[in-house]
Image: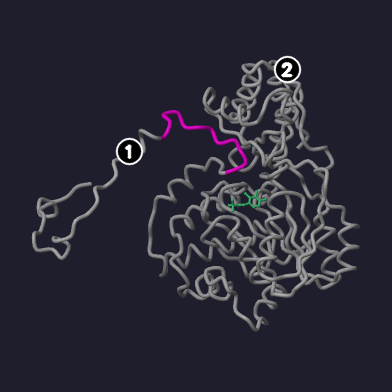
Amino acid sequence: MLRSVDDSTPVRSAPHAALTFTAPPEVRVLSDILPDDPLLMMGAGPVPIPEAVARANSVVINHLGATMSTIISQVKEMGRYVFQTKSEWVMGVAGPGSAAMEMAISNLVLPGHKVLCVVNGFFSARMAEMSRRLGAEVITFDVDGHHYAPADEVEALIAKHRPECLTIVQGETSNTVFNRELPAIARAAKKYGCLVIVDAVCTLSTMPLQMDDWQIDAVITGGQKGLSSIPGVSLIAFSNEAWDRINSRTTTNSHWCLDAKLAENFWHKGGYHYTAPVSGVLALHEALRLVCAETLEERFARHYRCSQALQNGIEAMGLRLFTPPTSRLNSVVGIAIPDGMNNADICAHISNRYHVEISGSFGLPMVRIGQMGEQCRAHNLFRTLHALGSTVRDMGGKVDLPASMATLEYSLHNALV
Ligand SMILES: *Cc1c(COP(=O)(O)O)cnc(C)c1O
């Protein structure tokens, strides 16, 4: 940093002159810490970001005023498109996907409410835990065996318990399960006046989600997965019915930062709630703009084509996909660990040797490769699949790498989408 001579001249009479301070720590500069050849981020998030998103993320502007107001109104407008809703209650959240999750739940669930939580894995269990912490009476429907939740079974539970809210994840990133009957589940819940909260952190903009048509009341997403933005700035949408429930609350939300009525000041009234993470909102703006430029139809087709080709390539290598086809998520692909290996070793080797980052799992015998946003590009797929096959081979496993690469190429170019 440049300083003038005057800046660096100590002022003997400054208020702190008589104080003693501990010495500042000696740390390494970032360029010494970060690898020269950056890792290709092909795990379960965060995912690579486009250049426009990175550039926007380096800009700081006033968090209030005319420029920000234009940005906010465009983020909401693009958010409505991505969520496929006409509801005006779209907002950004400073915080991870989990903060958006807690915002949805803490504004809609009151102490003593019954909440039916469909639990397929780690992230859907988090929504049950958040509901419990709010003092709700939580009924969990634990779906075992890495399976999607069947709509008829969920509807029977709704009819029996008559919950005020239902929570469900569209794609369970933790074990790569896809809740394919989400539309029927959401519509069934609405027949009983039950509000529906959907976690679409990994799936939004990677596969269809029709908020209005499916009658969903709150959808949440993070930045760092399907949208290919930065982590730490998230997006939420409430339906009109959800907003009515928020307006009719007689007690305030105990989470001040996550209070939707306070957030309304900033996101709808040009006022102040907390200082918005302006750079992150600009990054999110660019990520959403790129989704709009691509169109949802094209983006879903790209994700489908890439994920299918990757899955075909993995199987052609001789490895096994973790989740059965009927429940399999495309946004994150789970690969069963070959006998005698463990996921920590595989992840470490592929990262150290091939500079490709993939994810282990929460105690399950699999590794995960993400297919979200920028991860769904042919050049990333070729490099990742080759690195995975080479890793298993380096570790003494048997794989057919040429067949795998040929299958990837064939599938990418002959996909029926
Ligand atoms: C990643 C993820 C979350 C949590 O998001 P954070 O940004 O880590 O809080 C929640 N749900 C799903 C489905 C996810 O994939």
Q: Nearer the viewer, residue 288 or 362?
A: 362
Numbered range of the magenta stretch: 34-45
Is residue 191 left or right of 43 when viewed as pictured?
right
Q: Quadrant of residue 398?
A: top right
| Quarter placement of the C terminus | top right
Which residue is tagged 1? 29
The location of residue 339, given as percent across then percent down, is: 74, 23
Farthest residue toward the bottom? 250
Neighbour tally class for label 2: few under 14, some 14-19, many 20 plus, Cα within 10 Å: some
Q: What amino acid is found at the position of numbered circle 2 in the picture?
A: Ala
Q: What amino acid is found at the position of numbered circle 1 in the picture?
A: Val
Query: CA gap, disc 2 to disc 1?
Result: 44 Å
Q: Secondary structure at mark 1?
A: loop
Q: Residue at x 72, y 30 (%)?
A: 309
Q: Earlier in the sequence, mark 2 or mark 1?
A: 1
The location of residue 389, given as percent across then percent down, is: 66, 21
Q: Is residue 115 above or below residue 392?
A: below
Which residue is tagged 2? 403
The location of residue 354, given as percent across then percent down, is: 54, 24
Q: Nearer the viewer, residue 155 or 91?
A: 155
Q: Nearer the viewer, residue 124 or 277?
A: 124
Chief SS of the magenta region: loop
